[in-house]
Amino acid sequence: MKENITGLTTEEVNLRISQNKQNNYDEDVSKSTKDIFKDNIFTLFNLLNLIIGICLALVGAFSNLFFMVIILINITIGIIQEIRARNLVAKLSIINEDKSIVVRNSSEISIASEEIVLDDIVKLVAGDQVPSDMIVLSGQVEANEALLTGESDLIVKNKDSTLLSGSFISSGQCLAQVIHVGKDNYATKIADEAKVHKPFTSELVSSIRLVAKFTSYVIVPLGLILFFEAYFWGSGELKSSVVASAAALLGMLPKGMVLLIMIALATAVAKLAKKEVLVQDMYSVETLAHVDVICLDKTGTITEGKMKVQEVDLLDDTFEEMMEDVMGSYLAASSDNNITMQAIREHYPEKTTYEASHVISFSSERKWGAMFLETIGTIALGAPERLFKESDLPTEIESAQKEGYRVLMIGVSNEPMIDDKILPTLKPLAILKIDDPIRENANETLAYLKNEGVAIKVISGDNPVTVSNVARRAGLAQYEKYIDLSELTTEDEVRGVVNDYHVFGRVSPQQKKILVRELKEQGHVVAMTGDGVNDVLALKEADCSIAMAEGDNATRQIANLVLLNSDFTTLPDVLFEGRRVVNNVTKVASIFFIKTIYSLILSLICALTAVAFPFIPIQITLLDLAIEGYPTFFLQFENDKRKVTTKFLPTALKRALPNSMLVVMNVTFIYIYGQVNGWQPIDITTLMYYMLIAVSAMAVIKACMPFNPLRIFLAVTTTVGTYVAAMLFKGILEISMLTSETLPVFIVLVVVSLIGKIILDKLIVRDHAR
């Protein structure tokens, strides 16, 4: 085959290497370590806390700096999770050091694929993956371009045909010349379009950032006002002035809420890892909980991604005992190894019972292969319509084809073949029904998603009729509503049909992206599954992208989730984890936002009245740990698979408002009452702090309802434990014990606050959602 083809000389190879025309382009589209650190460290939330921390450190208020530990934990969890996920994908994505056979200096040599240079002559045989875009010089092969185009049919490549990088050679042999290397390759160009990192979509984190952004507008001016008032009209001491103003500002920043979200998501990531789901972007767990449209690829997603013989109908009973020997002998003598033949080889083990001669390989042009087996005769395997007259075809053929099977027939004849192009008259021997099996539990998964209000779109590069049949067998409702997108030429046409059909066939990579974008612009939260380069653009466009571990390297690198078992039926588990995180965090979020609201209101009151903020940072930190951190940490592990129906921030703020109002009213009353009755400042501060604990504990008790043993335990230990801690560390907290004068007031205020909470909850929190 390689006559007159000498290939490149050593000098020509070296010249191309010096011109950077080598196939060693870095296709890594994953996030760099630098970007991971940058995204987790340099946030507005962290900046505001850092500025406050620096101010406290400069005046020596080191005991009030414990809140920085929470910030560091937030950052550490985020960085570790992202690096771990990226490194695991890198292990999955290590390209096998497949060698390529190239012709150089008139000789065949084996080199690493990345050492190929432009114009190299490469020898390709069945089973090879095409390492670079090429043009066939001689020979003939059949290429499987499913990873690139989604089209599962084999494509015959003759002289002057183009072979795309990333495709597989299913049969035949050829010599081809490299026409593109590195970043100019077809597969690399598609992957490069997805290289820009899309911002994550997390309602929880976005809400926290919105709060941080809002408070950033008031923190600087309010902080300066509180500081100058405390310094010039208060004690005149720098340290106490900074500590007082810092406490007000820290209270507005829900740092405990950020930590809870990070822990909740990290826990979900760990639980999903046990179910062989790799979460690269932990915020995507939350996103999937909001998904209302999921776009599924056919090959490798709904199906297993490999052909399998589902059924053999024997049409000649005389071969019942010898069928396995006949097929085993046929396969042993045949060199055919395309995806269909691989399925047949898995079904029938090779044997040498009958000696073979006059072997004719299968070709897509003939659509059959044949050979002569000693004592048996001519055995032919191929498309039914090419082996037999239409009138002679069994009725089972049509019904099997309608069901979506790939149907082959086996024919037998006592006569030998006249030549390689003409078969003798054959007698039907057997029907082989072959298909890409539907994944186990696919029907249950699709039914579950439908029942949960998730619309399903099947988007594939394959024939729409084939895709529709796969969808039907998988139990997809309205599978008959399918369309061939190759007939649509404009973007507007593609956008216009997105709601009219459930199955989309012959879809190009760009059209997949358009479909996903249109769904998003209609207000849907869209998830997309895929395994090939043809899915990369749509995966990048989707709100939540899900790749199969068995798929292409580029899809794994850019996906939010990677299914390590390549089984989409694990999606309900991911959905459950997302809902658990969102529902549990929403349920306890009001505990955190109480502090944000009352800190803002009290700061404004203090700024207007020139009164020092009533609390100090270390007091706030104790509540962060005991009231916010301890109970919510355990509550976020509870199972809650309910569909997410509320918006996080409005719901959390509304539930927090009654307790925040009670805190403000209690603090205001205690200050005025204490001043009128001539109480010592420490007694006023102590009673304020004890009432702050009481009102905050009421929020914990509310979040624990309806009670179960765990929730009762958390409610009791939180309330009692916080008061015990306040008494034990009263020196550090700069408070004292309740006195005979303040204790009765405390009891009365607790009772009034309980009644007030019941009334305010009925007036403000109308949804009664847990």
Image (cartoon, helix red, strand yellow):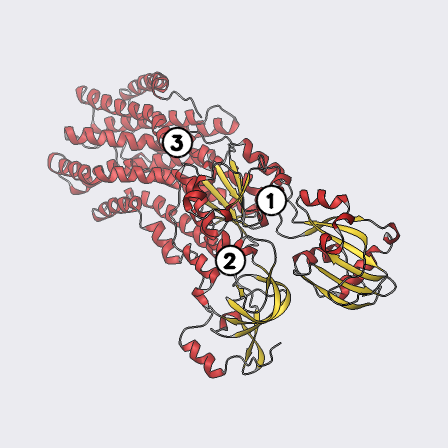
Front residue of 511/280: it is 511
Q: Amino acid at mark 2?
A: Asn
Mark 1 vs 2, N-terminal side: 1
Location of mark 3 (residue) = 647
Front residue of 263/520: it is 520
**Alpha carbon of mark 1 to alpha carbon of mark 2: how far?**
29 Å
* Residue 615 makes an appearance in the image: yes
From the top left corner, tell me how far across and down residue 126 is, in percent: 64, 66
Instruction: Please tell me whether mark 1 or mark 3 is closer to you in this view.
Output: 1
Q: Residues within 10 Å of mark 1 (few under 14, many from 20)?
A: some
Instruction: Please tell me whether mark 1 or mark 2 is closer to you in this view.
Output: 1
Q: Is residue 675 above or below residue 57?
A: above
Numbered circle sitting on residue 33: none
**Alpha carbon of mark 2 to alpha carbon of mark 3: how far?**
36 Å
Location of mark 2 (residue) = 553
Q: Is residue 121 above or below residue 284?
A: below
**Alpha carbon of mark 1 to alpha carbon of mark 3: how far?**
41 Å
Apparent side of residue 91 relative to residue 608 in the rendered image (left or right): right
Give the structural element (helix, strand or loop) at label 3.
Answer: loop
From the top left corner, tell me how far across and down residue 171 is, in percent: 65, 64
From the top left corner, tell me how far across and down residue 405 is, in percent: 68, 47
Q: Amino acid at mark 3?
A: Lys
From the top left corner, tell me how far across and down residue 410 is, in percent: 77, 55
Q: Amino acid at mark 1?
A: Val
Mark 2 vs 3, N-terminal side: 2
Q: Is residue 605 above or below residue 69?
A: above
Front residue of 474/422: it is 422
Q: Residues within 10 Å of mark 3 (few under 14, many from 20)?
A: few
Res. 263 image quadrant = top left
Res. 600 image quadrant = top left
Res. 650 image quadrant = top left
Location of mark 1 (residue) = 465
